[in-house]
Image (tube, rainbow, N blue to C red):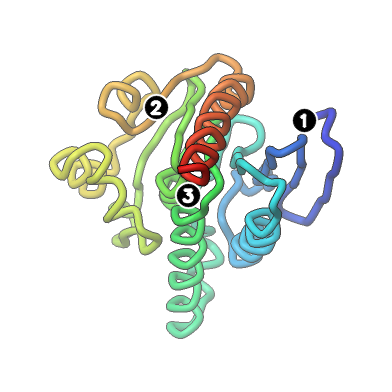
Amino acid sequence: MTGGDESARSSSIIVEERNSLAFIRINRPSERNSLSVATLEDIERAFISLAASDRTTGVIFTGTGDVFASGADICELRTLTPAAAREFAARGQRLFQRIADAPQLTIAAINGYCMGGGLDLALACRVRVASPDAVFAHPGARFGIITGWGGTQRLPRLVGAARAFEMFGTARRVGASEALEIGLVDALAEDVLEGVLEIARTRVWAMVTTSREAASS
């Protein structure tokens, strides 16, 4: 991204602000943008700061390369003690619920593979826009696990219980066109960030207008 008025970098994410919109880009390409403990901490810290700012009207999450986010870091999970694993699950739940409850517009700009916990992150956002090459799945069944970050509640609300149970139980991959058809995403865009920016401008203006009308009534 270019043209931001403020930029900040950490080891696992890139944060950029463009006027009233903020971008959080997951930046672990060598690890397929997996959501490690440190990555969740970075996202949580950045999101809390952005959400507390009066000038932030929208927060956009995206990834790097051909991956939005590939879910929890499986190699790291194998090393966690039971207590640490419970805290890891709780941290993800708290973070994604915070995103879901935020007064700002939250958008997932899904630039590619969106798997497991990465899909849970997208589900926590108010709007999801995907590239035509995006791929979605909850692959936990292959490892004998299931997501603990709210996806079991949010996915059925979007696509219906039958489709959600199939995705959880079979780990089947869903392409972008099917995701749009079943309501998993709101729109497709060849240039996903440009598509997201257009939606953000429209939605944010609508939110501001509604807020002003409520205040004056």
N-term mark: 3 or 2: 3
Q: Quadrant of the N terminus?
A: top right
Question: Mark 2 and 1 residues: CB-CB less than 8 Å, in contact?
Answer: no
Question: Mark 3 and 2 residues: CB-CB less than 8 Å, in contact?
Answer: no
Instruction: Give the percent coordinates (x, y) of residue 92.
Output: 48, 64
Instruction: Give the percent coordinates (x, y) of residue 57.
Output: 63, 42
Q: Nearer the viewer, residue 20 or 120?
A: 20
Say which amino acid is labelled 2.
Asp
Instruction: Give the percent coordinates (x, y) of residue 76.
Output: 56, 66
**Residue at 64% from the left image edge and 61% from the top image edge:** 48
What is the distance, in whole Å, between disc 2 and disc 1 at their CAs? 23 Å
Q: Nearer the viewer, residue 13 or 65?
A: 13
User: What SS does tag 3 mark?
Assistant: helix
Image mark count: 3
113 in relation to 94, above or below: above
Say which amino acid is labelled 1.
Met
Instruction: Give the percent coordinates (x, y) of residue 19.
Output: 77, 36
Q: Can you tell which of label 2 and label 1 is closer to the viewer?
A: 2
Dot 1 corresponds to which residue? 1
Q: Nearer the viewer, residue 46 or 115?
A: 46
Label number found at residue 121: 3
Q: Can you tell which of label 3 and label 2 is closer to the viewer?
A: 2
User: What SS does tag 1 mark?
Assistant: loop
Quadrant position of residue 65: top right
Say which amino acid is labelled 3.
Leu
200 in relation to 12, above or below: above
